[in-house]
């Protein structure tokens, strides 16, 4: 029997087991952002380590000072190459009113797997594990390690500290990350670059409590209005252009070749709008949309709090306000420098506004040619019937930059999520098409890597 046929059978035979395990994992609300979920985070680590050891890998929970991560592996021979598979098993909060049903009550609707974390990133983690298990069963001469993180959604604050435990987490020869989104169903797309992130809270307190506008309005300062003024000075709301002085100085513009490769990715503005429910965009030119979401920095306003948020209006003059912002960064911007630019600029605009840093992640740029990229191409073709397009990704995976800094080994991406799966959105799901294709792609990836080493 050919490997191809055996793999087909393996994938079908393991479908029920995959669905059962995904259900167990999705049912734990591992929301790293929510301090009230600390117990669930521990339960998640325990279950993950159980899932990995049940699959035959040697697994351990590695303490980091924050939430732990799970490190596991099959060591088949010291002379074989070692690849580390990175996924994360913490999830975004799921408080959006649009959820149809409990986000943590897993539902399998004939191969559609619903629940928070199904596609980001528990489904891909399990698909990769099943692919790895097949490769090991086949005797592929490779050592496969797993890193399942539990702090990805909060910017991986303790990941670097955990990785330094070299016995529990040995340095691999390469890394493959499965936590990214294709452009369109049926067309694998693998990124070679990620944007960085600087998050900040701008707070302004002008009084000890809210006051009545009929009594104090006119004389009282309004912190929300002042914060809105700061926001207006930071970003052009219509064009998205960032107005912080010096912000674009280090930006490495995408080359013509990169834009050309973006255009081959099957990206469609219409589909992009439908997938994310947009009524209109700042531009409808495909090359410009892709440049903006993957290769250009941003300044985004996420929320403005303070004052009254109930029905109707209540005539208060708020005592304080908070503006929640973040900036996506591209190579070669540095988060520290950008945060500093923001802080100095805001101090000039309004010296009473406090700028507090939230998350900080550097951007990442890998390469899109070479032997590892060839392995990804062949693996995706084997799993999904099509060679992948190489693109950049607008999101941030801090752990990638951490691994790159510490290990200095090639980092590749083999993501399995689709735009319509609802990453970070209500009604998130994963599906059997992507899971089964993913298992096959990963199984092939490992045998390609092993072959590459012996060439
Ligand atoms: Zn993710």
Image (spheres, rainbow, N blue to C red):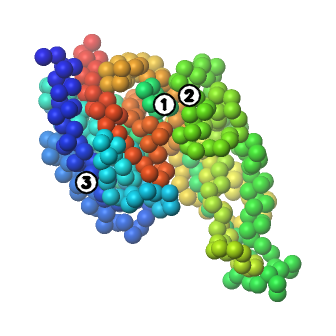
Decide which of 225, 60 is in the foreground and name it: 225
Q: SS class of the residue under badge 3?
A: helix
Q: Which residue is mark 2?
A: 267
User: Of marks 3 and 2, which one's residue comes earlier in the chain?
Assistant: 3
Instruction: Provide residue 452's location: percent of width, then percent of height.
Output: 29, 17
At a point 50% along the width and 43% down the height, the residue shown is 396
At a point 58% along the width and 22% down the height, the residue shown is 263
Q: Which residue is mark 3?
A: 24
Looking at the rendering, which quadrant does residue 43 occupy?
bottom left
| CB under 8 Å between discs 1 and 2 | yes
Looking at the rendering, which quadrant does residue 42 occupy?
bottom left
Decide which of 318, 119 is in the foreground and name it: 119
As drawn, the residue found furthest toward the top would be 455
Q: Is residue 418 left or right of residue 343?
A: left
Ligand 1 image position (quadrant): top left
Q: Is residue 197 left or right of residue 186?
A: right
Please identify the quadrant where the N terminus is shown.
top left
Instruction: Provide residue 51's location: percent of width, then percent of height.
Output: 20, 48
User: Of marks 1 and 2, which one's residue comes earlier in the chain?
Assistant: 1
Please identify the quadrant where the C terminus is shown.
top left
Q: Is residue 26 left or right of residue 213?
A: left
Residue behind label 2 places its C-beta within 8 angstroms of ligand 1: no
Q: Label 1, label 2: how many angstroms apart (C-alpha)?
A: 7 Å
Residue 229 visible? The answer is yes
As drawn, the residue found furthest toward the front would be 110
How packed mark 3 is, by other alpha carbons closer than 10 Å (few <14, some 14-19, many 20 or more), is some
Q: Is residue 309 above or below residue 241?
A: below
Q: SS class of the residue under badge 1?
A: loop
Instruction: Provide residue 111's location: percent of width, then percent of height.
Output: 31, 41
């Amino acid at each position: 029997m050919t490997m191809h046929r055996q793999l087909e059978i393996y994938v079908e035979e393991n479908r029920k087991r995959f669905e059962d395990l995904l259900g167990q994992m999705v049912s734990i609300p591992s929301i790293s952002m929510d301090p009230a979920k600390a117990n669930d985070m521990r339960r998640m680590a325990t279950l993950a380590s159980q899932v990995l050891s049940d699959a035959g890998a040697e697994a351990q929970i590695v303490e980091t000072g924050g939430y732990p991560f799970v490190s596991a592996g099959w060591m088949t021979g010291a002379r074989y190459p070692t690849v580390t598979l990175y996924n994360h098993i913490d999830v975004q909060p799921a408080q959006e009113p649009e959820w149809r049903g409990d986000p943590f009550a897993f539902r399998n609707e004939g191969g559609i797997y619903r629940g928070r974390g199904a596609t980001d990133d528990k489904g891909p983690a399990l698909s990769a594990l099943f692919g790895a298990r097949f490769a090991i069963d086949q005797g592929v001469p490779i050592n496969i390690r797993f890193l399942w993180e539990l702090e990805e959604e909060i910017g991986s604050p303790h990941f670097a500290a955990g990785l330094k435990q070299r016995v529990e987490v040995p340095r691999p020869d390469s890394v493959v990350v499965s936590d990214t989104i294709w452009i369109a169903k049926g067309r694998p797309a693998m990124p070679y670059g990620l944007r960085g992130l600087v998050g900040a809270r701008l707070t302004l307190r002008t009084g000890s409590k809210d006051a009545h506008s009929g009594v104090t309005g006119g004389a009282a300062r309004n912190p929300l209005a002042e914060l809105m003024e700061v926001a207006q000075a930071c970003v052009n709301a219509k064009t998205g252009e960032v107005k912080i002085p010096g912000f674009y100085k280090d930006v490495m513009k995408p080359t013509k070749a990169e834009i050309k490769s973006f255009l081959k990715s099957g990206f469609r503005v219409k589909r992009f709008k439908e997938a994310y429910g947009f009524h209109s965009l700042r531009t409808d030119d495909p090359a410009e949309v892709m440049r903006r979401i993957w290769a250009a920095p941003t300044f985004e306003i996420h929320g403005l709090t303070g004052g009254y948020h109930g029905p109707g209006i209540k005539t208060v003059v708020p005592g304080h306000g908070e503006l929640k912002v973040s900036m996506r960064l591209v190579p070669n911007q540095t988060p520290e420098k950008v945060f500093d630019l923001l802080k100095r600029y805001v101090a000039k605009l309004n010296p009473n506004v406090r700028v507090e840093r939230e998350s900080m992640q550097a951007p990442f740029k890998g390469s899109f040619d070479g032997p590892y990229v060839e392995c990804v191409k062949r693996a995706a073709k084997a799993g999904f019937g099509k060679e992948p397009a190489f693109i950049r990704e607008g999101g941030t995976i801090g752990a990638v930059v951490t691994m790159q800094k510490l290990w200095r080994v090639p980092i590749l991406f083999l993501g399995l999520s689709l735009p319509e799966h609802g990453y970070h959105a209500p009604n998130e799901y994963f599906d059997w098409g992507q899971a089964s294709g993913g298992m096959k792609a990963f199984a092939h990836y490992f045998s390609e890597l092993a072959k590459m080493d012996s060439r």
